[in-house]
Amino acid sequence: MKTYVVGGAVRDELLNLPVQDRDWVVVGATPEEMLAAGFRPVGKDFPVFLHPQTQEEYALARTERKTAPGYAGFAFHAAPDVTLEEDLARRDLSINAIAKADDGALIDPYGGQADLAARVFRHVGPAFVEDPVRILRVARFAARFTEFTVAPETLALMGEMVASGEVDALVPERVWQEIARGLMAAQPSRMFAVLRECGALKRLLPELDRLWGVPQRAEYHPEIDTGVHVMMVVDTAARCGHELPVRFAALLHDLGKGTTPKEEWPRHIAHEVRSVKLAESVCARLKVPADCRDLAVLAARYHGDIHRAEELRPDTIVRLFEKTDALRRPQRFEQLLQACAADFNGRLGWEDRAYTAPARLRRALVAVQAVPAGDIARGCADPAQIPERIHAARVEAVRAAG
């Protein structure tokens, strides 16, 4: 029995990056031998075990054979006669197909170290096309490793997978999982650039894909189309270190512009309403978690109103707080302001423009929160007038706050 560290841990160590988790492959062992050594089985589809002390995953070396469409359509063969090279051959990219022995020696049968040095994502072999998740993984890696490019032959294979319909077998949960991880990477726009280049974006997120070629409003920067703008917004949210709901809201906030008739360009009348419906559709299809879904819908509907906060009357601001549930959910409202700030700043030539809307709304929200709603309710003889009295007091508080 021999054990090797494999995959991302080896790759990240060679890139001088922090190693978060280590995965191991075991060559020349049976499940019975692993159990006898104190390992605990956890794998359902193939033999994976947890180390009795470190709790790290140890998988028996295996080969795999495609049996059906989709990422789950594989038959696995794990046996003592499966070699390390055979196990590494089933991996996606050469940079993830490097193993490290106990003595520190590197086993690199597919040129991973050379591709690390060249900063290239290259598939290990033709079996790459059998797993559509690899399209999403390569795109996600592009968002994380921003100096890397996708090898032309690998991109071509990804395009073949899209054309063959293999990508359509992806289940919504897995698509969301990979998109979410890519959004939390250093430069999320690179993930969507790769997906768009291989044709997968049109199949997975057609609502987003339609934004390229649609001009922005004339006062913004019409030569930069909406797709490019949205990518700038997402990257701005990433540079600010915002949480996933904010980044996802940044991604979906302008979907309605993709449905504006060409004869109306560059104007986008009432695109917020269309954006809400499209955002809701995307979230339902991908089974997006509630926190991300709710913020994305709010950003799609209210980002224009928030941008105009300096022009809004106190009554309108209070109604905005009511519609967004800002009093009960102030933290979510702050995330909404963060998404709107990313939208405002995600434009060319706007570096010298101050975005003052969030400051006014934060100041107004503090003033509204200080209104003693309970006291007003107790002092009101007619219960039917309570909501009106409280609303009026909040409006006056906003007016006084300036």
Image (tube, rainbow, N blue to C red):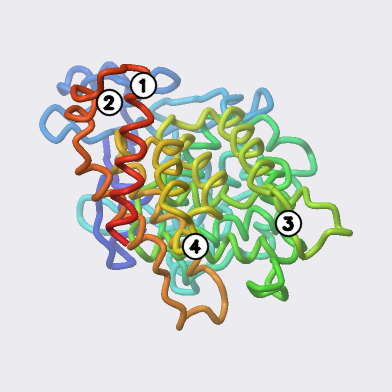
Task: Inspect the image, locate mark 1, and give the three-letter code of the amino acid beneath it.
Answer: Gly
Residue 165 seen by the camera: yes
Residue 311 disc label: 4
Task: Inspect the image, locate mark 3, and give the three-letter code of the amino acid beneath it.
Answer: His
- Mark 1–mark 2 Cα distance, whole angstroms, equals 7 Å
Tell whether 64 sits left or right of 102: right
Residue 268 disc label: 3
Which comes before the other along the chain, label 1 or label 4?
A: 1
- Residue contact at pointers 1 and 2, CB within 8 angstroms: yes
Q: Nearer the viewer, residue 360 or 158?
A: 360
Question: Is label 1 or label 4 in front?
Answer: 4
Task: Inspect the image, locate mark 2, and give the three-letter code of the amino acid beneath it.
Answer: Phe
Task: Inspect the image, locate mark 4, and give the three-letter code of the amino acid beneath it.
Answer: Glu
Residue 43 disc label: 1
Q: Secondary structure at mark 4?
A: helix
Q: Crowdedness of circle 1 by 10 Å Cα count: few (<14), some, many (20+)?
A: few
Tell whether 119 sits left or right of 375: right
- Mark 1–mark 3 Cα distance, whole angstroms, equals 52 Å
Q: Crowdedness of circle 3 by 10 Å Cα count: few (<14), some, many (20+)?
A: some
